[in-house]
Image (cartoon, rainbow, N blue to C red):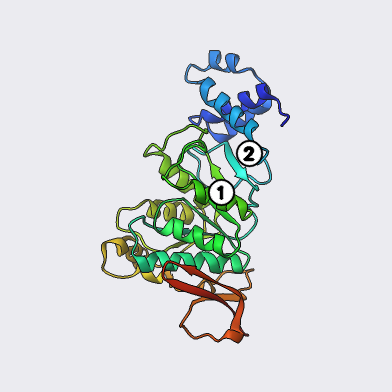
Amino acid sequence: MDFDCIEIERRLAIGLNDYLSIAQRHRLVRSGMPLEKIAKEDERFRLYRRETRDAIHWLSRSRDNSIIWYGEEDFPEFRPLKAHLPYMIMCSGKRPDPKSSCAAIIGTRHATYAGIQEAFRLGMEAVQNSIQVVSGFAEGIDQGGMSGAIAGGGPCIGILACGHNVEYPGLTAVMRRRILDSGGCVLSRFMPNQTPYKSNFISRNMVIAAYCSFAIAVQAPGRSGTLSTCEFVTQMGKDVYVGSQGIGDRYVQAGTSALFRDGAKVISTLSDCPLSGIDFRFHVLECGEDNTQDDVFGFTQRFGDRTYVVKELIG
């Protein structure tokens, strides 16, 4: 892979200094000013030598690895957020189109079995209706939604709270590969060897909110990162929905029940979402629900002890 290592190192270092606004970083990048001169004029500016060299090594390992820079057409929109925004996103796989419809299927890692099944069904239904799925790799709802998208043929966007060289959560290497094989991508705003600090998860949630067109919180307790994602989604002027398994008096339903009381609509299928510009043609049903073989489109998929079929909506 051919690229200018010195210029990429300079751009990465500037981008990592996120105490600067994104506009200030962009001006510095465009100025061509050497890093040493910037550091001499601003004592807060860090050179990030190790991190930038790790990133260049990661880029050189595969043609599937790339950087999505601020200002490029496929960089996501974070407005009206202003603080601590990423200047670049590390991408493994096919770069996503921010203009495509995308559903964030999110929720707690402590989900009920029914909640995980609902996340899987919604993820599968999304991709059947040409809607990408984005989520954050956590066990439970996140992985359930991404598994449904992969089972439905993808694509899926997985957002890491760590660098690409770090496997977190554990045992997700197989899912990362499945995402890439289905035409999706794995993204991170962090350098490749960055470990998952607690603050990283808020940053990850911000990226999920930027890429989605709307969010579905399937299940979440009262104190949950899912709620921070929903807050970012709302701040960006997008809609938040609650899964039907998110309503109740269980601990894992407290946060989603609060979203419902605050006005979020409860849905059991994507066709319940009043989304403009999306023509919902297919519905995913659990086998044993109201369907006949003549209604089934293409294939069935099994997840856990349940089997799902795709049914074409009539009218």
Residue at 45%, 60% (x, y): give it: 144
Dividing the picture into quarters, in which one does residue 313 lie? bottom right
Question: Which amino acid is tagged 1?
Answer: Arg
Q: Residues within 10 Å of mark 2 (few under 14, many from 20)?
A: some
Give the labeled residue for mark 1.
Answer: 177
**Quadrant location of the C terminus in the rendered image:** bottom right
Of the residues tagged 1 and 2, which is closer to the observer?
1
> Percent position (x, y) of residue 265?
43, 70
Q: Earlier in the sequence, mark 1 or mark 2?
A: 2
> Percent position (x, y) of residue 296?
59, 80
Q: Secondary structure at mark 2?
A: strand
> Percent position (x, y) of residue 67?
63, 37
> Percent position (x, y) of residue 91?
60, 42
Q: Secondary structure at mark 1?
A: helix
| Left or right placement of residue 286 versus residue 72 in this view | left
Residue at 46%, 83% (x, y): give it: 289
Q: Which mark is residue 72?
A: none
Front residue of 287 and 90: 287
Residue at 54%, 66% (x, y): give it: 124
- How far apart are labels 1 and 2 at the CA level? 13 Å
**Quadrant location of the N terminus in the rendered image:** top right
| Left or right placement of residue 303 versus residue 9 in this view | left
Front residue of 241 and 236: 241
Give the labeled residue for mark 2.
Answer: 65
Question: Which amino acid is tagged 2?
Answer: Asn
